[in-house]
Amino acid sequence: MIGAGAWGTALAQVAAHGGRPVRIWARDPAVAEAINTTQANPLYLPNIALSPSIEAVSDPAEMAEMDALLVVTPAQAVGTVLATMPVGSKPLVLCSKGIEAGTRRLVGDVARAIHPDAPIAVLSGPTFAHEVAAGLPTAVTLACEDAGLREALSQRIAAPHFRPYATDDVTGAEIGGAIKNVLAIGCGVVEGAGLGQNARAALIARGFAEMTRFGLARGGRAETLAGLSGLGDLVLTCSSTASRNFSLGVGLGQGRSSAELLADRRTVAEGAFTAPVLRQAAAAAGVDMPVCEAVCRLLEGAAVGEVIGALLARPLKAEGH
């Protein structure tokens, strides 16, 4: 595991099921020491006793002997971190969700540019780290174009409570995971502003239509976007304050500024970084994404009433457009 935040630690716990050996890289040596000496990660995943077969390191060179690397850093840091890692031709399983600022590249494209010989897979789906680490039932999408590697990775990460579903649609899996973070901010705004459950359901449905339009334009498949990595993840993150993106939206809906809300976060609300990049990418692809545009305006400080009013005042159209 490359990254010892909550999600990286939870995935290490899954991969260590039954005493299987797992190595996790932590940027902060103090986090690595805590995992090794106390079998816990109190900073990012408190109250979870970790498997003794998990070993933590803070030197990238110590990842050289691993068979495969799961990348679980924030999406905007993937390029920087991967540049320090001894990857070569080892498979990279991308568990970060987002679009790189400045380049508008999906995380998979970032990884391919840095390590062109490494096979790429994507792990995505409706997953709260604390539930996964606690052994609660979870299903995810594992996307990889190579059928043999896809099967091998699925078998290696599967556990009695953790069920991967395989696909070869890497692009669709990545896009669903990136866009759902932006839409979760919008649903949080609905909650924070007290706009009701009708509004939240409408936003999820219309947001999913936008996700599908953009995903198809970028080469993803509709069935992937309607699966665990798209619709499944969207429903989860749009309905609980355990989602960092949803919580950010709640604060915006209550009238707080994005600068204030993002300044005091040890963990990252990826949607705040993805939203403006997605706006640019959608414009370049000629895809209409009014809900995502509204989230951008809210992050920029526009008033909730003004933004919602503009959404509702758009010209009437047929469903499916």
Image (cartoon, grey):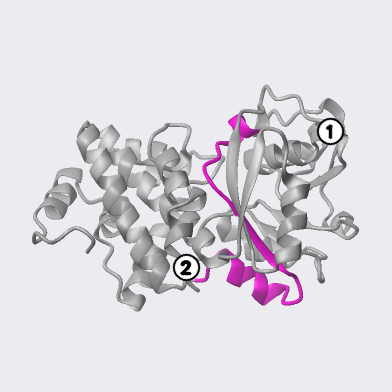
Residue 232 among magenta residues: no
> SS at mark 1?
helix
- In depth, the one of 121 and 269 nearer the eye is 121
Q: Give the residue at the far right of this rendering.
A: 65
Q: Position of residue 284 (x, y in %)?
A: 35, 77
Task: Please state which amino acid type lies under the numbered disc 2.
Answer: Gly
Residue 5 occupies which quadrant of the picture?
top right
Q: Is residue 165 above or below residue 117?
A: above
Q: Earlier in the sequence, mark 1 or mark 2?
A: 1
Dot label at residue 18: 1
Q: Is residue 115 above or below residue 224?
A: below
Q: Residue at x 37, y 61 (%)?
A: 212
Magenta region includes residue 123? yes
Where residue 80 sits in the image (x, y, percent)? 66, 64
The C terminus sits in image quarter? bottom left
Residue neighbourhood size for the residue with mark 2, other residues' Cα within 10 Å, grouped as few (<14), some (14–19), many (≥20): many
Residue sticking out furthest to the top: 47
Q: Which residues are magenta?
A: 105-132
Can I make out residue 156 in this image? Answer: yes
The local secondary structure at tag 2 comes to: loop
Disc 1 packing (10 Å; few <14; some 14–19; many ≥20): few
- Name the residue: 66% across, 51% down: 72
Against 63, residue 219 (above or below) is: below
| Residue 286 location (% of width, % of height) | 30, 76
Please indicate whether residue 32 sits to the left or right of residue 82 in the image. Answer: right
**Residue at the spot of label 2:** 220
Residue visible at 66% across and 38% down?
Answer: 162
Q: Could you say which quadrant of the image residue 275 lies in? A: bottom left
- Residue at 55%, 42% in the rendered image: 267
Amino acid at pointer 1: Gly
